[in-house]
Image (spheres, rainbow, N blue to C red):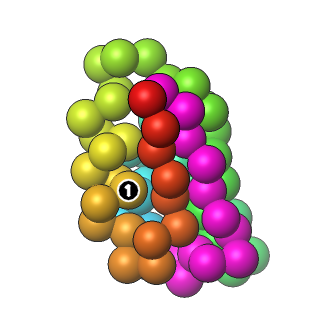
Amino acid sequence: MRIHVDQDKCCGAGSCVLAAPDVFDQREEDGIVVLLDTAPPAALHDAVREAATICPAAAITVTD
C-alpha cells in the first residue's frame, strides 16, 4: 500500500487522524494533513482505506 496526500485539497477536518492516527497527523498552525507513514504495515491498511473514504476533501489517495 502506498499513500499520497494532496495538502492543497485538504480542508483540515481531521477525519483521517481520527481514523488512522498512526499514519496521519495535522499541522498545528492550520490543521492540514501530514502523512506520517507512506507505506504503513498491513495491520493499518483498513484504517487507512477508511480515512481515504471519509476524507471530505478527497485529499487522500491509496494504491495497492
- The majority secondary structure of the magenta stretch comes to loop
The relative height of residue 23 versus residue 10 in the rendered view (above or below) is: above
Point 43% across, 17% down: residue = 41
Instruction: Give the quarter of the figure containing the C terminus.
Output: top left
Q: Position of residue 11 (x, y in %)?
A: 54, 82
The relative height of residue 1 versus residue 54 in the rendered view (above or below) is: above
**Magenta segment: does it hold 3?**
yes
Residues shaded magenta: 1-12
Mark 1 closeness class: few <14, some 14–19, many ≥20 residues within 10 Å: many
Residue that extends furthest to the front in the rendered view of this protein = 64
Front residue of 39/19: it is 39
Q: Which residue is mark 1?
A: 52
Point 55% across, 33% down: residue = 2
Describe residue 28's horizontal placement relative to residue 13 as left or right.
Answer: right
Q: Is residue 18 visible?
A: no
Q: Position of residue 6 (x, y in %)?
A: 65, 65
Describe residue 54's horizontal placement relative to residue 33 as left or right.
Answer: left
Q: Position of residue 9 (x, y in %)?
A: 61, 78
Circle 1 — which element? helix
Q: Position of residue 1 (x, y in %)?
A: 47, 27
The relative height of residue 41 versus residue 5 in the rendered view (above or below) is: above
**Magenta segment: does it hold 63?**
no
User: Residue 47 occupies which quadrant of the picture?
Assistant: top left
Point 30% across, 19% down: residue = 43
Q: How many marks?
A: 1
Q: Is residue 56 visible?
A: yes
